[in-house]
Image (cartoon, rainbow, N blue to C red):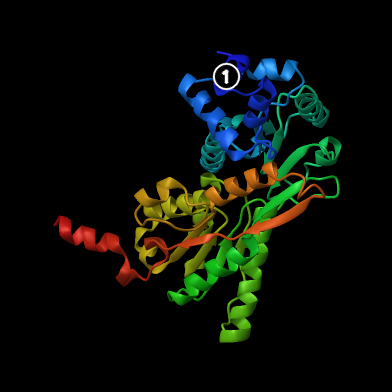
Amino acid sequence: MNSTQIAKLAGVSRSTVSKVLHNYSDIPEETKKRVLKVIQEQGYRPNIMSQALKGITPKIMSVYFFERLRNVSPPESINCHYNMAMLTAISLEAKKLGYTVTYEVIFDSDSEDDIIAAVNEAFASRRICTAVFVGLDDDCNFIDKVAALDRHIILLDKGVDTTSGTRCLFSNDYNSSIRACEHLYSNGFDHIMHISGESYKLSGRERLNGYFSAMQRFKDRYSINCEPHVIPGVFSIEHGYKAGLIFLKDKLYEHYNGITCGCDMIAIGFLKCLHEHSPRLIDELGVIGFDNDKVDLYLTPSVSTMSPNYRNFAHLIFDLEQNYEEFKGGMTLKIDHELIERDSSRPKERRTYHDLRLESR
């Protein structure tokens, strides 16, 4: 089955079928429904390579995730949960809108010239219609070399010059970090420290800055005499575990009863360290992370988190893609996190795993 046969069955021209497939706005709704009905009945799938050879840009979105291998040992343990959660949300939205999604990983060891050449070739050969970049840090400065007003390029959590048409979507990490601190304070954990992720990533830097602002607010509003304290590092379980060892060795538990973590993996590593070396402390501390990793629910205590709205990100990505002319001059948008309270940030008497232990006796 090809587009000519689809056109014949629907009683329209082949160009109309092509316009329906590419969501042109000048096709009457009744005609569009008739063509789509025939496409669905016949199980028709356009040949993507054939479209590209004919000069038609297929509806393919390529999602590029950036990873620093030097921070990861072994390399196979890269932050796959966040990547896959974001990719899944984008893929589900793509399926509804008739797009295909490809997944690429850019490593810090990759030559910038090679990255630029690969992205330029993908656009020039019409293999992709949109490029989405996730997780680029401060050292990634190649976007201006691939951006153009006729290219659909979207960045997540990195700021660049948008005059060339690039669109930027941000998690509101600064405000969310303040909310995480306020949440701990409201539950009685009033002396708070921070275990940070990479400061050369915008998300790590904004979460750290939000922590410092929250500490200043607490000092001004509540006269809390608590000096900010940060254990710097990277977004990983290993860093969380090492931070736990520092927390115990330096007896930081004598000064701090609340811990905000740059991500959930840090919180998980920190709690694992306490389980192994000083489990009695766990009930005395409030801990909260970022990202809403699925494993958070299955730990003891379950991990509280500031959850990014992956579905909202995906919806906005396709909104920007499909309304390109409206946002052609480039733009930026910020998206808030949702606070999800679980046992790790609740006061001891409200933690549900204590109830479960009693029930199991």
Q: Amino acid at mark 1?
A: Ile
Task: Assign the C terminus to one quadrant of the image.
Answer: bottom left
Viewer-side residue, 244 vs 158: 158
Q: Is residue 75 left or right of residue 202?
A: left
What residue sits 55% from the left and 69% below the top?
179
Q: For residue 209, which quarter of the picture?
A: bottom right
Q: Position of residue 107 (x, y in %)?
A: 69, 32
For label 1, the crowd category at 10 Å Cα-Cα, with few meaning under 14, some 14 to 19 and many 20 or more, is many
Q: Secondary structure at mark 1?
A: helix
Viewer-side residue, 285 vs 145: 145
Viewer-side residue, 9 vs 283: 9
- Considering every residue shown, the one lying at the far left of the view is 361
Q: Position of residue 171 (x, y in %)?
A: 63, 56
Residue 40 higher or lower than 324, as above or below? above
Residue 165 higher or lower than 47, as above or below? below
Q: Which residue is mark 1?
A: 6
- Considering every residue shown, the one lying at the far front of the view is 11
Residue 72 higher or lower than 180, as above or below? above
Q: Position of residue 125 (x, y in %)?
A: 77, 21
Q: Is residue 179 left or right of residue 302?
A: right
**Res 104 seen here:** no
Q: For residue 103, which quarter of the picture?
A: top right
**Res 336 seen here:** yes
What residue sits 34% from the left and 63% below the top?
280
What residue sits 56% from the left and 20% below the top?
45
What residue sits 65% from the left and 55% below the top?
204
Q: Position of residue 327 (x, y in %)?
A: 76, 50
Task: Assign the N terminus to one quadrant of the image.
Answer: top right
